[in-house]
Amino acid sequence: MNPELIAAAKDVIDANRALGRTVATAESCTGGLVAAALTELAGASDVFDRGFVTYSNEAKMESLSVSSDILETFGAVSIAVAWAMAQGALKHSHADIAVAVTGVAGPGGGSAKKPVGTVVFARATRDGDPDVVVADIRQFGDLGRAEIRRQAALVALNLLLPEA
């Protein structure tokens, strides 16, 4: 496992443990990399409730209750879908905070509007206003599949840190 991912995961575990807060992940293009980094650490079960790897649209609908209308209207790589994934992770877990990540890791699958390296993130909190969307789109560029996934996992882990 990448040392930078482990260090970021340790920060997430330590910071959320201090707050008595639990986390969940909803991952598509990272394929469980965020959850894997968190569970690489002993004692992660104090903080990490569960992770959802929802690679297909069907999985997003079945496991996270993402609406087919949202998927059809905006596409899987969109703020609307990432937000729905984060909300779904909260709905289907006991976590206090959830992060979602969906994107195009490549090498193919990109388009003019969503080229390879486009990754969308969302964070939702159980006590947060569900009408206030906390999301971001990053354009990592065509760095190669492994590096796009690594960069995306780092961003997702950072979103699980308490806000300054």
Image (tube, rainbow, N blue to C red):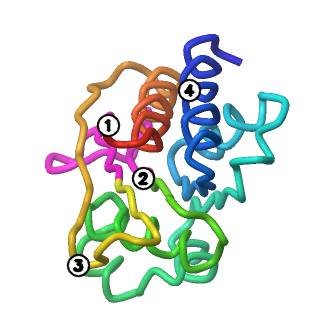
Question: Mark 3 or mark 1, which is nearer to you?
Answer: 3
Cα separation, mark 2 vs mark 1, equals 12 Å
Q: Residues within 10 Å of mark 1 (few under 14, many from 20)?
A: many
Q: Which residue is mark 4?
A: 11
- Sequence-wise, the earlier of marks 2 and 4 is 4
In the image, the segment drawn in magenta is 101-121
**Is 92 left, or right, of 118 in this rendering?**
right
- Compute the Cα span from label 3 to label 4: 28 Å
Nearer the viewer's eye, disc 2 or disc 1? 2
Q: Are marks 3 and 4 in contact (CB under 8 Å)?
A: no
Residue drawn at x 58%, y 22% as measured from the top left:
5
Q: Quadrant of residue 33?
A: top right
The quadrant in which residue 72 appears is: bottom left
Q: Nearer the viewer, residue 28 or 40?
A: 40
- At label 3, the amino acid type is Asp
Point out which mark residue 116 bears: 1
Instruction: Tell me the mark number nearer the camera, choosing from 3 and 4.
Output: 4
Q: How far from the left and from the top, in percent, is residue 13?
A: 64, 36
Residue for point 33% across, 43% down: 119
N-terminal-most mark, 2 or 1:
2
Q: Earlier in the sequence, mark 3 or mark 1?
A: 1
Residue that appears at 67% across and 56% down: 51
Mark in front: 2 vs 4: 4
Q: Position of residue 163 (x, y in %)?
A: 33, 42
| Disc nearer the start of the sequence (2/3) | 2
Give the CA separation, mark 2 to mark 3.
20 Å
Between 46 and 63, the one nearer to me in the picture: 46
Is residue 96 found left or right of 6 in the rendered image?
left
Left or right, 21 with reference to 44: left
Which residue bears the numbered disc 2? 102
